[in-house]
Amino acid sequence: MRFELTTDEAATLRGFLSDSLPDLKREIARTEDRGFRHQLVVREELCERLIAQLGADPSHAPAVPPLRG
């Protein structure tokens, strides 16, 4: 799946993702269930990748592969 964002939309999404990371990191640190912790870590890594891509110059950003599901 591909979609385009305006500069403002990208900034808003980047801010939303950045704001959610501290809570996600705290939840990872507090959970005792290994399976759930793994899911949270995967989500954290995805957020960090998206933040990096949203912050990158679009002409130099790698293409995001389509999600399969």
Image (spheres, grey):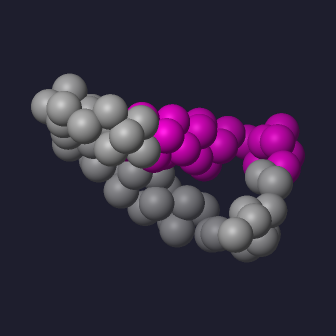
The picture quadrant where one finds residue 33 is top left
Badge count = 0
Position in image of residue 13 (x %, y %): 46, 60
Q: Is residue 58 left or right of residue 6?
A: right
Q: Say whether residue 55 is magenta.
A: yes
Q: Is residue 3 left or right of residue 19?
A: right
Position in image of residue 12 (x %, y %): 43, 61
Q: Residue at x 80, y 62 (%)?
A: 66
Quadrant including the C terminus: bottom right
Image: magenta residue range:
40-63
Q: Is residue 57 above or below residue 34?
A: below
Q: Is residue 4 above or below residue 30?
A: below
> Can residue 48 be seen?
no
Position in image of residue 38 (x %, y %): 41, 36
Position in image of residue 22 (x %, y %): 24, 36
> Can residue 7 be seen?
yes
Q: Is residue 47 left or right of residue 7?
A: left
The picture quadrant where one finds residue 41 is top left
Q: Residue at x 52, y 68 (%)?
A: 9
Q: Residue at x 73, y 42 (%)?
A: 57
Kindly report the secondary structure that dominates the magenta region of the rendered protein.
helix
Query: 1 or 30: nearer the eye?
Result: 30
Q: Is residue 49 above or below residue 17?
A: above
